[in-house]
Image (spheres, helix red, strand yellow):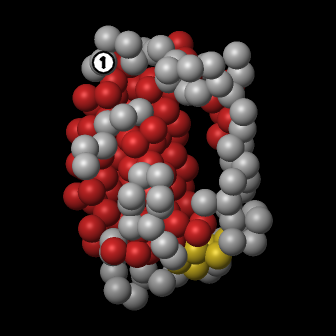
Amino acid sequence: MSITPDTKDWTWVLERPCPECGFESAARAVSDLPDLLGTTTTAWTQVLARRDVADRPRPGVWSPLEYACHVRDVHVLFAERVRLMLAEDVPTFASWDQDATAVERDYGSQDPDAVAADLAEASRAVAVLYASVTDDSRGRRGLRSTGDEFTVESLGRYHLHDVVHHLHDVGALRG
């Protein structure tokens, strides 16, 4: 069974806590991101070691492996966007269809060990970028193709919510 695409606008998580996963992005600063991304990477590595990592919990819901592939690709995408924001004045980001990417890259059949290694590398790479952000550059702006405006800092908080939220989705968050 295919996955129903997620078409929700999640930008509201920048202003209020997420009632589903409990993440409060407003409580995070760009300087927090490198360590927090490292912590989430450890959790994703544990998820990818599960025996049933490729099993969907129910029809129409991604498996933990598929979520991990998505998070790996999110890290790569956000690294590209942060690089653009640091190099250009108010760049507009190309649209990204996460659901088409999942199908094209066949997330469900990827090797969990390779995904764990790639996710860790992508997380490290984007964490290095966030660590390079200064007080002068954290307010640099960028636009999604929908017109939503982000600063480097708000984009980082939005990014971190996505990663944490998907840990919640796979039951890896501990209260």
Point 77% across, 65% down: residue:
146
Indicate the quadrant containing the N terminus: top left, top right, bottom left or bottom right: top right
| Residue 59 image-quadrant placement | top right
Q: Is residue 121 above or below residue 144?
A: above
Query: Whole-percent x and y of residue 58?
Result: 56, 20
At x 31%, y 63%, the residue is 33
Circle 1 sits on which residue? 50
SS type, badge 1: loop
Q: Nearer the viewer, residue 163 or 121?
A: 163
Q: Quadrant of residue 119?
A: top left
Compared to residue 31, the image places residue 172 above or below, namely: above
Percent of width and height locating residue 165: 44, 48
Mark 1 neighbour density, 10 Å: few (under 14) some (14–19) many (20 or more):
few
Is 20 above or below relative to 103?
Answer: below
Residue at 40% over, 75% down: 26
20 or 67, which lies in front? 20
Q: Residue 79, can we see it?
A: no
Left or right: residue 124 compared with residue 162: left
Residue furthest bottom as drawn: 136
Q: Is residue 39 left or right of residue 162?
A: left
Q: Position of residue 113 (x, y in %)?
A: 33, 19
Question: Label 1 amino acid?
Answer: Arg
Residue placed at 68% from the left, 44% from the top? 6
Q: Residue 129 location in percent, x, y?
A: 37, 62
Q: Nearer the viewer, residue 125 or 19?
A: 19
